[in-house]
Image: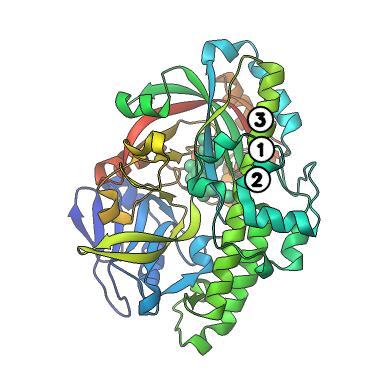
């Protein structure tokens, strides 16, 4: 790399401030992951480190890859009282994209004979693909209630159970949402899209718990080897994307009036204590509620399918956590408690044992951290660590991370062959887009095992269980 990376420990690398950097850049990874990382990640990390009010360091997780302005797998915290900023590109376009994990109450043996029927029924019942619409059509009043209520609204509408809410970040309802900041265009894009998976890397997967790494935490998570579990990965659909697009433009236009110098226009941001900063936070929080509600409705649809195909199933929520957000959190920095706006873009919040914001039943062991691999490889369940606060404001990786662009992947693989090859290995794929499958071919991603091993070795989180795909409904 042409960047001056210094190894500060076996699993962490540091770029000391140079030029306009206010803080260092820190990357958590092993040597191989670092070598494979695009220099663009280091460039973007250094750019983030120049932003006003940034605290401690700009971080990159082991799955980091090049993104819009901020790297995906990037973490940065800002202090509002020191001119700190909020950035639309630092959250990402799919606001509150995240993963929800469900236990099914079934073992793999119990679903094996019904596997294809399950895949077909899920594919029929859960809307998936570009611009897919659901059965829910929101009028103005319903839209506002959803934007304020999140998963709590969804439960009130009959999607799922009140007990689900206990196992969602923020209890499924993000405070401080401001529907007044959501444009007509964003509303229009979302009015028919509730309860839809979307396209690309979004998926609904039935998986087998293949290995338990930490029996004590796994017991607290209610996971045993050979259990069947479900992962749902999706976000705030058209609404989040529209908000990201609009506010990015506003932030670019307002930068000079806020006296912010942008090394890259994609880093557009606004002071947290500005009208625009507050407007974005209000809109972003409404989009977080949209994502919570969306995953809640999809959970309901998934339960309906299981009830039909495998009536003995009992789907309960392990956890639901986002990986594209900016959240106000209290963190100890150099011995002092501070309130910081933590951007996590393609990075999972990972609160350690005892953190008050973890559901009571899980508090002793740490927050579940849900990491997708790809449709053809393992995925992982980790738990937040105590050291995580000091290392990364309690953040960990969010996936394997892309190893090549979508475009490169479509040149290398054909969707049909990927589906057939995975089928031969016993993995049932259902997708409306063979191009999408090619873009998402397992080989287009990094080695997820190396990524979670690095996250664990660096101290960001603890490995709890490895899961392997049985059925993947892919956007
Ligand atoms: P992102 O949030 O950046 O869109 O994707 C998160 C991660 O999900 C990716 O880095 C990738 O490792 C993982 N992923 C993408 N597609 C799939 C899939 O079909 N199944 C699973 N289990 N993981 C996936
Ligand atoms: Mn995501
Ligand atoms: Mn997403």
Q: To which residue does mark 1 refer? A: 298
Tag shown at residue 461 = none
Residue 150 vs residue 40, the one in the foreground: 150
Label 2: element kind: helix
How crowded pointer 3 is (Cα within 10 Å; few <14, some 14-19, many 20+) is rated as many
CB under 8 Å between discs 1 and 3: yes
Whole-number angstrom distance, CA of label 1 to CA of label 3: 6 Å
CA gap, disc 2 to disc 1?
A: 6 Å
Q: Is residue 27 left or right of residue 173?
A: left
Residue 285 in view of the camera? yes
Where residue 375 sits: x, y (%)?
Answer: 55, 33
Q: Give the side of residue 418 with respect to residue 461, left or right.
A: right
The quadrant of the rendering that contains the N terminus is bottom left
Helix, strand or loop at label 1? It is helix
Q: Position of residue 319 (x, y in %)?
A: 48, 37
Mark 1 Cα-neighbour bin, 10 Å: few <14, some 14–19, many ≥20: many
Q: Give the labeled residue for mark 2.
A: 294
Image side of residue 307 versus residue 211, left or right: right
Q: Is residue 447 visible?
A: no
Q: Whole-Å distance between the Cαs marked 2 and 3?
A: 12 Å
Along the viewing direction, whichever of 188 and 434 lies nearer the viewer:
188
Helix, strand or loop under label 3: helix
Q: Residue at x 28, y 46 (%)?
A: 30
Crowd class of label 2 (few under 14; some 14 to 19; many from 20; radius 10 Å): many
Q: Name the N-terminal-most of marks 2 and 3.
A: 2
Could you say which disc has been placed on residue 302 in the image?
3
Can you tell which quarter of the image residue 113 is in?
top right
Q: Position of residue 441 (x, y in %)?
A: 56, 38
């Amino acid at each position: 790399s042409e960047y001056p990376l210094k190894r500060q420990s076996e699993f962490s690398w540091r770029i000391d401030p140079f030029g306009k950097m206010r803080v260092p850049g820190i990357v958590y990874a092993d040597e191989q992951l670092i070598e494979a990382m695009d220099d663009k990640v280091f460039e973007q990390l250094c750019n983030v480190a120049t932003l006003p009010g940034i605290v401690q360091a700009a971080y990159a997780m082991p799955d980091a890859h090049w993104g819009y302005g901020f790297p995906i797998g990037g973490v940065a915290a800002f202090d509002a009282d020191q001119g700190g900023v909020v950035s639309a590109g630092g959250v990402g376009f799919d606001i509150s994209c995240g993963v929800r994990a469900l236990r099914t109450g079934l073992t793999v043996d119990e679903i094996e004979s019904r596997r294809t029927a399950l895949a077909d029924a899920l594919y029929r019942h859960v809307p998936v693909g570009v611009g897919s619409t659901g059965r829910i059509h929101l009028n103005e009043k319903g839209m506002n209630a959803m934007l304020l209520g999140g998963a709590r609204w969804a439960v009130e509408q009959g999607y799922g159970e009140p007990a689900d809410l206990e196992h969602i970040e923020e209890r499924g309802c993000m405070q401080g949402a401001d529907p007044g900041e959501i444009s007509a265009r964003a509303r229009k894009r979302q009015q028919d899209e509730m309860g839809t998976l979307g396209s690309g890397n979004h998926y609904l997967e039935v998986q087998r718990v293949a290995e338990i790494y930490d029996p004590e935490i796994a017991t607290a998570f209610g996971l045993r080897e050979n259990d069947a579990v479900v992962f749902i990965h999706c976000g705030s659909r058209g609404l989040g994307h529209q908000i990201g697009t609009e506010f990015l433009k506003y932030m670019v236009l307002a930068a000079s009036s806020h006296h912010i110098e942008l090394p890259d226009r994609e880093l557009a941001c606004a002071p947290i204590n500005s009208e625009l900063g507050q407007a974005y936070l209000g809109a972003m929080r409404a989009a977080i509620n949209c994502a919570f509600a969306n995953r809640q409705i999809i959970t309901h649809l998934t339960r309906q399918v299981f009830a039909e195909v495998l009536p003995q199933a009992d789907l309960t929520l392990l956890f639901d956590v986002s990986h594209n957000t900016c959240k106000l959190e209290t963190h100890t920095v150099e011995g002092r408690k501070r309130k910081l706006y933590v951007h996590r873009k393609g990075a999972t919040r990972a609160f350690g044992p005892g953190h008050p914001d973890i559901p009571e039943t899980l508090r002793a062991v740490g927050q579940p951290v849900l990491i997708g691999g790809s449709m053809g490889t393992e995925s992982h369940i980790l738990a937040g660590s105590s050291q995580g606060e000091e290392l990364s404001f309690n953040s960990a990786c969010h996936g394997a991370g892309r190893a090549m662009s979508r475009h490169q992947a479509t040149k290398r693989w054909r969707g049909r062959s990927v589906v057939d090859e995975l089928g031969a290995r016993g993995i049932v794929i259902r997708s409306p887009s063979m191009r999408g499958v090619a873009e998402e071919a397992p080989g287009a991603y990094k080695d997820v095992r190396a990524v979670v091993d690095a996250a664990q070795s660096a101290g960001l989180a603890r490995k709890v269980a490895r899961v392997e795909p049985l059925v993947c409904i892919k956007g």
